[in-house]
Amino acid sequence: MRSLLIALLMSFFIVSPALATEVRLSVALGLRDAFKELVAGYEQKNPDATLLPNFASSGALAKQIAQGAPADLYVSANPQWMNYLVEKQFIPANKVLIFAYNSLVFVGRQNPAITSLEDITRLQRIAIGSPTSVPAGQYAEQALRAAGLHEKVRNKLILAKDVRQALIYADQGEADGAFVYKTDALLANEAVILLSVPQSLYNKVTFLVAPTATGLLSPPALDFFDFLQTDEARVILKKYGFVIP
């Protein structure tokens, strides 16, 4: 029995250093492609570190963290969900940083008739991220309400689980158009940007990053958090169309 206990202790001390280098990232889906390159660049310089990104809508990720899902860093596409975790004390308020900015556009197959937001009322199927959890959908709904168009298109909206699914609906012709981030629109195969949503109609699309309470106790997590603020990281973000604060 004693020999078994010693063996278990030895295996713990052998494995624990490796586990300590794992950094779990909860990242808003709109940053997926840029973040994959950020992770690859960091791991190349830090071969002992293992970054484990989890991509989903900001709301879904925030709810996962609040329910106990492991996360060392959280990146949100809407201050609402970051504030949600700060209020629940999963995120220290003094560690929240503005990471990048984005903008909202309307995409679809080439349609010269769409030259203003009012024109989309003539469409039959409009994809939008579900406003209950998808920041891109929340921004789009805000813009539609501000423009006085929400009631005119409410029954035409196709709710997507995230901004990428909304883009796919428009790209594959399953919707006549979709509200997405400009950076996502650049990834489309068939859909093109039909119009940029006037910034005056919605809050500025702001991506925020912060370590979680558990991430504060992880030196590798804090090191990656610092890396995200470097010039190297900023170059990658600009490459994918993000605006750096």
Image (spheres, rainbow, N blue to C red):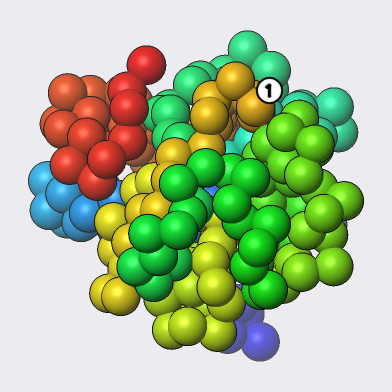
Q: Can you give x and y, in whole percent of width and height, for residue 154 in the image? A: 83, 59
- Quarter of the image for residue 68 reads bottom right
Q: Position of residue 37 (x, y in %)?
A: 22, 54
What residue is drawn where x is 55% and y is 73%? 176
Percent from the top left, x then y, of residue 96? 58, 21
Residue 104 falls left or right of residue 161 = left
Whether 11 is drawn above or below 237: the answer is below
Q: Residue at x 51, y 20 (%)?
A: 97
* Residue 11, visible in the rendered structure: no
Q: Which residue is mark 1?
A: 92
Q: Against 226, is 104 above or below?
A: below
Looking at the rendered structure, the secondary structure element under dot 1 is: loop
Residue in the foreground of this view, choosing between 217 and 201: 201
Q: Residues within 10 Å of mark 1 (few under 14, many from 20)?
A: some
Task: Name the residue rendered at 68%, 51% in the picture.
Answer: 137
Above or below, comparing residue 204 to residue 9 in the picture: above
Q: Nearer the viewer, residue 92 or 240?
A: 240
Residue 80 lies, in percent from the top left, at: 75, 32
Q: Quadrant of the N terminus?
A: bottom right
> Is residue 37 visible to us here?
yes
Q: Residue furthest top?
A: 94
Q: Quadrant of the C terminus?
A: top left
Disc 1 marks a residue whose amino acid type is: Pro
Q: Nearer the viewer, residue 208 or 105?
A: 105
- Count how many numbered circles sit on residues in the image: 1
Left/right placement of residue 7 relative to residue 229 reads right
Left or right position of 236 against 33 = left
